[in-house]
Image (spheres, rainbow, N blue to C red):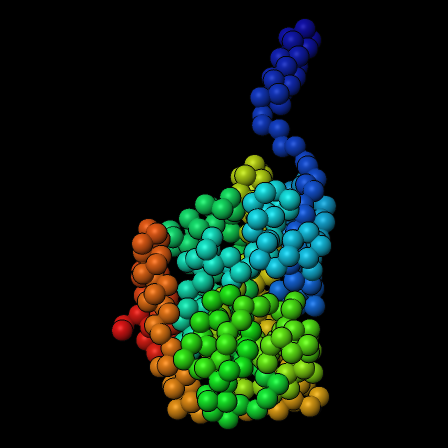
Amino acid sequence: MKDFILKGVALATMAVGGALAAPQVQAEDFNVTIVAGHPPVFRWVKHASQTFIPAVEAALEGTGHSITWSEQYGGSLAKVGDELEAVEAGLAEVGLVSSLFDPAKLSPQNVTYFTPFVSSDSTLVSGWMDELQATNDDMRAAWEENGLEYLGGGIGIDDYLLMTTFPVESIDDLDGHKIAAPGPAVNWLEGTGAVGVSGNLTLYYNEIKTGVYDGVIVFASAALPGKLHEVAPYITKVGFGAQYAGGLAANKDWYDSLPEVVQDALKAGAKADAEAYQKDLDASVTMFLSMMEEQGATITEVDPAFREEWASGMNNVAQDWAARLDSEGKNGSAVLKSYMDTMRAAGAEPVRDWDRE
């Protein structure tokens, strides 16, 4: 009996000692602010709320960890183009970072905006660009140099259109008109005679209505929610192409401090976000164009000769962009070639082979 008791004590002692020695997993609730400069009326912000957050929470089920979210959209914490700085400074832990509006800090990410007329397939463009953020050293370095960890959720943009207050039957019709475009897309107006003005979706409606702009370069999936057809009813399908405009990113110091299971949940949420967003986008574009037409817009599509005339009239902005990045040690020429090769291999037929001139 004595031996049995002693053995029991020994086993209990071993069990306690083992428990003390085992790593302790501390369940924790994390307070996370997510920021976007655009309001939820735009699809990528809507899916941050309706897809990304629920997907992260689903991935955390059973882990003992949870997140309490504070959603700050529509300029409540950061304006369009200031999301990177807000996340970098720790004002928000996660942001929908618009690389389009940070062309200096996220220059490699803007390759699509310097290569118009390549592909109208936004799923192809955004999917490849999403992958490139993780596999390309220059892409990854651009995020990390700004204190960010790229999560995913690439914001694919459907084929850009020209929306104007006047009909466009030839490129000459643009001469002297002020046309707004986002970030590097202003370069697309070179050679047309139009006056390019930098702008963004939060400004377009009022600026057109008050006569500041005579038109904008924009995409259908944002034009309808933004009611742009009410003030710029002439829609010209030029075929500028689909684009990549950024994605979900986290403050890197904060991200690195998280348990691995929480890191994994954030990236799983971003992947789910990208898939749901793109499916939603693909289903909406044709419908949105039809709705704008039903509400009074006039839609025309240019012929290949018009498209080729526009593309050939531009300077090779892609080569200029790549050379500038090369001079900064960012391998812009390699990024440009890789992007163009991938698009051609996937079946794209660029109007202009920007990398081969």
Q: Is residue 270 visible?
A: no
Figure quadrant of residue 162 = bottom right
* Quarter the C terminus occupies: bottom left
Residue at (65%, 89%) from the top-left corner? 297
In the displayed structure, does residue 278 sit left or right of residue 51? left
Residue closest to the far top:
2
**Total numbered labels placed on residues in the image:** 0
Residue at (49%, 46%) from the top-left corner? 146
Residue 15 vs 146, above or below: the answer is above
Figure quadrant of residue 51 = bottom right
**x, y percentage for residue 13?**
63, 14
Residue at (41%, 80%) from the top-left corner? 191
Q: Who is closer to the viewer here, 266 or 160?
A: 160
In the displayed structure, does residue 246 sit left or right of residue 221? left
Residue 178 vs 47, above or below: the answer is below
Residue closest to the far front:
176
Figure quadrant of residue 316 = bottom left
Residue at (62%, 20%) from the top-left corner? 20
Residue 168 vs 108, above or below: the answer is below
Residue 167 vs 200, above or below: the answer is below
**x, y percentage for residue 131?**
44, 59
**x, y percentage for residue 42?**
66, 68
* Quarter the N terminus occupies: top right
Q: Is residue 163 visible?
A: yes
**x, y percentage for residue 182?**
54, 68
